[in-house]
Amino acid sequence: MNLRRLFLSLPALLLAIGCSVGAAHAQKRVGEAVVVQKQVLRVAGSAANQINVGEAMMRDDTVQTGIESAARFVMADSTNLSLGPNASLTLDSTVFNDDHSYRDVAIRMTTGAFRFVTGHSEKTAYKISTPLATIGVRGTILDILTVRNSTTVVLQEGGSKVCAPDGQCLELINPGDTAIITLGDNGKFKIKKANIPPWTFAKTCASTAGLCSVNKYADDSPTVTPDVQDGGMLCGR
């Protein structure tokens, strides 16, 4: 390759290197811990490391809280996620529109109690699931409890559609509306609606200062670097 051809190809080479490095590292930061009470772990395979206030939440992270533990994370679009004791949550995927909004974000709440407060991404971007439910949101505050063979979803504000794995769905439109999904011994799902919730996250909120506060993702927080380059081009797409 002559020098002129090498010079012309250099920008493309640098872009490719930047994309591969960004894909492996910078783009994965999607939020940070703002409240940490006792044991809150980031789990990857057999490794588990304590998360501290100010540390990043990363794409594909699994977060677990211990006994008498709790945590709150603020994501890049100002979504707030609160976890009670013995809870486990995984960010299955995130795709950014820009530094502070998502095109797609999938949150899997495996077990435990949670409070979810939507940020300013389009509501269709959020995909929340538990072992027994898929949950759609419309500018929403939700309390979610998932235990063995049961998921309870309580609407605090906004609106939500809750569906069981067999396609049965309920619309939650008024504060206090609750969907309860259970899996019977016969392998069949049952979904029912209650207007007076049998459970809420409120007691968990009271146990830890700031657990149920709502913060915006601070402008002076470490920059979230999405997989978007100048001119709107997407690396690897």
Image (cartoon, grey):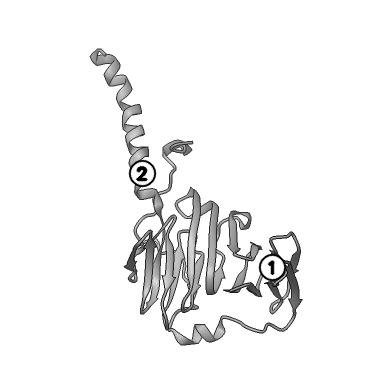
Q: Which mark is residue 69?
A: none
Q: Please name the amino acid that badge 2 sits on.
A: Gly
Which quarter of the picture shows residue 169?
Answer: bottom right
Q: Is mark 2 on a helix, strand or loop?
A: helix
Instruction: Name, please, the residue furthest toward the top.
Output: 2
Q: Residues within 10 Å of mark 2 (few under 14, many from 20)?
A: some
Q: Is residue 75 above or below residue 12?
A: below
* Residue 220 rendering spot, x and y as whole percentages: 35, 62
**Which residue does the numbered mark 1 point to in the structure image?**
159
Q: Identify the residue at image location x=53%, y=67%.
A: 110
Q: Using the rendered image of the protein, determine whether residue 162 is visible from the camera's viewpoint.
A: yes
Q: Is residue 146 above or below residue 202?
A: above
Which quarter of the picture shows residue 155?
Answer: bottom right
* Residue 63 rendering spot, x and y as whole percentages: 43, 66
Q: In this view, does 29 lie to the left or right of 174?
A: left
Q: Is residue 181 left or right of residue 1?
A: right
The foreground one among 110 and 72 is 110
**Which residue does the numbered mark 2 point to in the structure image?**
22
* Residue 167 rendering spot, x and y as whole percentages: 74, 59
Q: Is residue 156 above or below residue 220?
A: below
Q: Quadrant of the N terminus?
A: top left
Q: Please name the amino acid that badge 1 sits on.
A: Gly
* Residue 39 rendering spot, x and y as whole percentages: 36, 76
Q: Identify the residue at image location x=59%, y=62%.
A: 129
Q: Is mark 1 on a helix, strand or loop?
A: loop
CA–CA distance between discs 2 and 1?
Answer: 36 Å
N-terminal of the pair, mark 2 or mark 1, is 2
